[in-house]
Image (cartoon, rainbow, N blue to C red):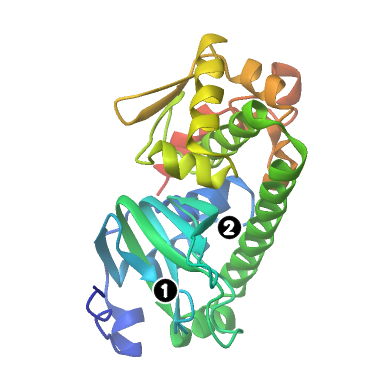
Amino acid sequence: MRLKPWPRRTFDMLFTEKPEKVRSLLSTKLMLAGRLDLAGADVLDAALARDVRTIEGGMPIFDQGERPDAIEVIVDGWAIRERVPRTGRRQIVAILCGGDVCDFNVFMMRAADSGCRVVGKARVARIGRTALNHLNRHHPAVGQALWWESMTATAIQREWSANLAMRRAEPRIAALLCMLFARMRLTSAIDAMTMPWPFTQSDLANACGLTPEHCNRSLSALRKRGLVEIKDGHVTIADPPALASYAAFDADALHCDPGLLPFASPAECDKGITPVMLTELANAE
């Protein structure tokens, strides 16, 4: 079952309507990275606010083989990117959270080489080709910030591949959870060490290249070590530095100040920036 097409809006409507200002997770992330100022964040948030819809769990944002004519941004919630080869067995190749762009390459490729599907429930914003070209031409700082975000997304994908190839099952799961926690903290989506978790154990096993049975044993081992607890649709990390150490987690792919991350030691907060600033920047006007 396919969703109804995105509602069409004219180019003039896109940039003359005055939506209620709400700081998006994407603009918050770009501000914290030093890639966007308040004026640029306002422009980006206005573009994101024009075309937003709620998508139920299991429904596609776009399908593999489809040629989307816009970029979609996860406003809040979760999604997965997955490939379905000719064998028909799907493989999760990325997990997306609030503030992530689903695919930056949609305008350049003949068709999407992977699909994107919502897990749980999510709100998704859409920026069409014309609007994106307008941003790049008239607000180059916003275009450069989105370019930086695309480079970071590519780095995260490289880290995903390295994680699958280099780590055993338990640290592999631990490293994935560290990365997801770090990404959510960088958007101020969470302010504690507990985050929503709409994924099944089969989803986690698929994402980590494990069988469900192996994944279950590995999660039990992490729980016995006091590192991770998955319960009632949430994941809790009791000791973030300990989990990062166990996973040999490297946050270089995020290209951010280590002091912004929950895994950082006080010595790493070299710029005087702390996670408290996440909320402050998110609420800045």
Residue at (56% x, 74% y) in the render: 113
Asked whether residue 255 is in view, the answer is no
Residue at (38% x, 36% y) in the render: 197
Q: Is tag 2's residue or tag 1's residue first in the polypeptide sequence?
A: 2
Check disc 1 and report the residue beneath it. 63
> With respect to residue 137, does 19 lie above or below?
above
Residue 64 in picture, x, y percent from top left: 47, 74
Picture quarter with the N terminus = bottom left
Q: Which amino acid lies under the numbered mark 2 shown in the image of this protein?
A: Leu
Q: Nearer the viewer, residue 54 or 192?
A: 54
Helix, strand or loop at mark 1:
loop
Query: Marks 2 and 1: which is nearer the front?
Result: 1
Residue 9 in picture, x, y percent from top left: 28, 85
Check disc 2 and report the residue beneath it. 36
Q: Quadrant of residue 142?
A: bottom right
- Give the Cα separation between the discs numbered 2 and 1: 31 Å
Residues packed near mark 2 inside 10 Å, few (<14), some (14 to 19) or many (20 plus)? many
Left/right placement of residue 107 relative to residue 6 reads right
Q: Which numbered dot is residue 279?
A: none
> With respect to residue 276, does 105 lie above or below?
below
Residue at (25% x, 65% y) in the render: 53
Residue 65 in picture, x, y percent from top left: 49, 80
Residue 153 in picture, x, y percent from top left: 63, 57
